[in-house]
Amino acid sequence: MDDWLIYRGVGAPDPDRIRRLPPPPPWRSFSGEPLPDPAPPIDSSSTRRLGARVAAPPAQDAETLELINAALYLRRPLLVTGEPGSGKSTLAHSVAYELGLGRVLQWPIVSRTELKDGLYTYDAIGRLQDAQLAERGSGRGSDDIGRYIRLGPLGTALLPAELPRVLLIDELDKSDIDLPNDLLNVVEEGEFALPELERMADRPGQDEVRVLTDDGRRVPVKDGRVRCHAFPFVVMTSNGERDFPAPLLRRCIHLHLDPPRDERLAAMVQAHFGAGSDERNLDLIARFTREDGDGELRPTDQLLNAIYLTQQAVRADAGRREEIAELLIRPLDTRQR
């Protein structure tokens, strides 16, 4: 395996490798003063997706590994396209787990999502209500504006940290047409302003305000701006339902993931069901993969469901295994008819 690879896709934690990452290119160097607090540890959101990946076969092919590492080296977002179930979201969790980068920050995109949703929210109404209650003597007001500001997933990822955070921007193609363009400046500059804090920065004692993060921590923000130190490892996923503007594509590394087959599929099955489980379920895997030529959509979740259910319900009855597989491994559009 090439020694230059920081992320190797081996499925086992190797947090020392991220410290081998060389300094960024001059045009991707950022000046934020690193915060001392480490990222929170990996949580159940990652372990659900990854399973027990130790001792599994490689989960990515050579080209995929090279593109992931290109994004790490160049401090550029990774735009991952592919069918549902091809492992786009799992990739972000795998990088965070293997490199010891902590909890994955997740920003699921819907048609109403705006850039500010990912950066921060300011609860002006809550602050006003607290002030009114304090005036009436029925509550305790606070001059601490930081209590009412919470950084979103993108805003938290851009906090100045010694090591990059992992940010998953999931299903960007579901967004309003303006969001990809709105992301351009933040992705390029690695910083953003909080106007509510900028207006207060010249007041005595207000140049630094502690705000909440997407992780639930309290961190300082100086002069009303969040400026990153280590650019986060950003994974933007798309099911290919729309095209993105050229300026955004120019700022990303593009990776297309085909549905997992062969070694990748074996690695996924072993991660969730243990060593040798791919061999024990060859009949179900063969049934799942032999339908590839019909052009229908079959996410890999269906295979996992079929393996789990047959293990629990009909361990030895080949006929019943086949019947359950028939029910669960069907094209998605067939179920909708």
Image (spheres, rainbow, N blue to C red):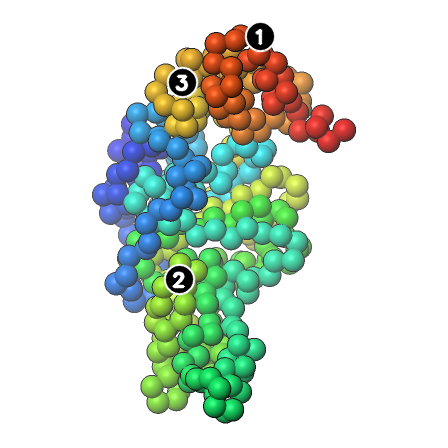
Q: Nearer the viewer, mark 1 or mark 3?
A: 1
Q: Secondary structure at mark 3?
A: helix
Q: Residue at x 54, y 83 (%)?
A: 128
Residue at the right extreme? 337
- Tally the numbered discs: 3
Q: Quadrant of residue 326?
A: top right
Location of mark 2 (residue): 216
Q: Identify the residue position indicated by label 1 in the image.
A: 319
Measured along the vertical axis of the image, is residue 81 above or below residue 186? above
Q: Amino acid at mark 1?
A: Gly
Q: CA distance from mark 1 to mark 3?
A: 19 Å
Question: Mark 2: few, some, or many residues within 10 Å (few <14, many ≥20)?
Answer: few
Location of residue 240 in the rendering, given as x and y in whole percent from the top left corner: 62, 39
Q: Earlier in the sequence, mark 1 or mark 3?
A: 3
Whether residue 27 is visible to the viewer of this picture, yes or no, is no
Q: Are marks 2 and 1 in contact (CB under 8 Å)?
A: no
Amino acid type, residue under disc 3 in the picture: Ser
Q: Amino acid at mark 2?
A: Gly
Q: Earlier in the sequence, mark 2 or mark 3?
A: 2
Q: Residue at x 61, y 14 (%)?
A: 323
**Which of the two labelled residues, at mark 2 and mark 1, occupies the earlier sequence position?**
2
**Element assignment for label 2:** loop
Looking at the rendered image, the quarter that the C terminus falls into is top right
Which label belongs to residue 277? 3
